Amino acid sequence: MNTTHTTHTELSTEDVVRTFVEYYEERGHHRITGSTLLPPPGDPVLFTTSGMHPLTPYLEGRPHPLGRRLVNVQRCLRTTDLDEVGDSTHLTVFEMLGTWSLGDYEGQQSLTWGYDLLTGGFGIDPRLLHATVFGGDDQVGPDTASLELWQDRGVPVELTVEDNWWSNGPTGPCGPDSEIFLWTGDTPPESTPTGDDRWVEIWNHVMMRHRRLADGTLVPLPQRNIDTGLGLERLASLLQGRTSVFECDIFDPWRRLVPGLWPLDEPTLRLVCDHLRSAMVVIGDGVRPANTGRGYVLRRLVRRVLTVLWRDDSSRQLVDLPSELTRHTLEHFRQDVDMDAEVVRRVLVEEERRFRQLLERGRQVLARPRFQGPLGEEDLHYLHDTHGLPRDLVLTLRQG
Ligand code: SER
């Protein structure tokens, strides 16, 4: 990644948060406290996946007690990106810096402030920015206001359709968006965001003015909102000139402590740090391993870690994880360190014990003559229903 796009001395992640929040407070925004990873009742997803989730009722018209301009830091969990974890820009649990205009200012104002903060506040070279804008479809026209704003600023723009429409799920508040990308290549910028993945998306400004109904039609929301979201770790690592989110300061203790405990190659190290850190936050927010819903996501995170750790050495155990990592993570997410650190340790150790038992049972059952040939659907159902062996576990054991 290019290390020369800022003129500032290195900003820590905490500095990035402070600069961002103060900038918006100076422009009349009130800071609201971020919520946990558990979305409010009635939300269609298992975890909060973006800063706007907890604000849905206010985007739909309910007056917010702190007014029409808000700013916050919200932790989010995205399982849609799970397969991308380990690349340079995706984490399972990450934090989103967000701003909202609840029926107050419009998109051009939001983009202007965004551009000024990135270039002035964070010192990003404006020549390294690219924008994308909604080009229109058969229901909603092109976002000409955003297009004109970027053209006035001399920022190159690409028009897209699906990539510039943001929604929270199949139904609910949604709208066209304008995304800001930062060039991370070692050469001068080239191509466009959809044409070259060295353009990394850093900030999304959504013109949240529609609601999609179950039959697919769009109706206007009672007010015209703006909802913006900026991935904290991604921006921090870019400002710190690091080549991946795993190298920003948040991961310093992980990079210092994990390799001494378990020698792992870089992709495995990233996966282990990402999933363990995510599991800790999820447990801190009150989730426990289970076979369905949120608990299943947690279970998958922990079991994936164990599976890769045991590939080389099955004596590795989570109980050896330095407590500094748990404390650092819980503290970062403003969870109750004293109470939760012990709970996190217990939950991880117990899940490991169950998984070892399950693997052991799986190996024994699969050694029976009946399962020596190729396994059909019926076998997989039987192994699941009678022996509690999930399909993915059976397939892993067969490969191993
Ligand atoms: N809701 C939008 C997003 O998640 C902007 O905050 O990208």
Image: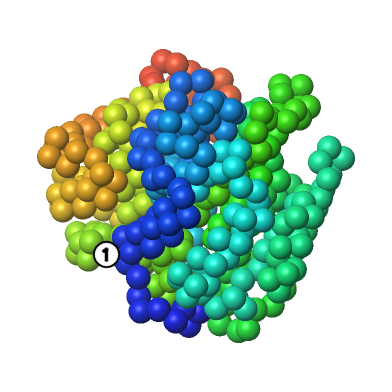
Position of residue 304 in the picture relative to residue 348 (left or right): right
Find residue 85 and report its horizontal and vertical position in percent.
47, 53
Amino acid type shown at disc 1: Asp
Position of residue 315 in the picture relative to residue 56 (left or right): left
Tell me: residue 199, above or below residue 73.
below
Tell me: residue 16, above or below residue 178.
below
Comparing 174 with 19, the one in front is: 19
For mark 1, give the secondary structure: helix
Whether residue 368 is visible, yes or no, is: no
Tell me: residue 249, above or below residue 170.
below
**Residue plotted at (70% across, 65% down):** 150
Whether residue 102 is visible, yes or no, is: yes
Give the class, few, some or many, for how many residues have Cα within 10 Å of label 1's Cα (few <14, many ≥20). few
Q: In which quarter of the image is the C terminus?
A: top left
Find residue 343 and report its horizontal and vertical position in percent.
18, 34
Query: Which residue, given by chain and number where applicable, does mark 1 sit on?
Result: 252
Comparing 132 with 118, the one in front is: 118
**Residue plotted at (39% across, 45% down):** 31
Residue at disc 1, CB closer than 8 Å to ligand 1? no
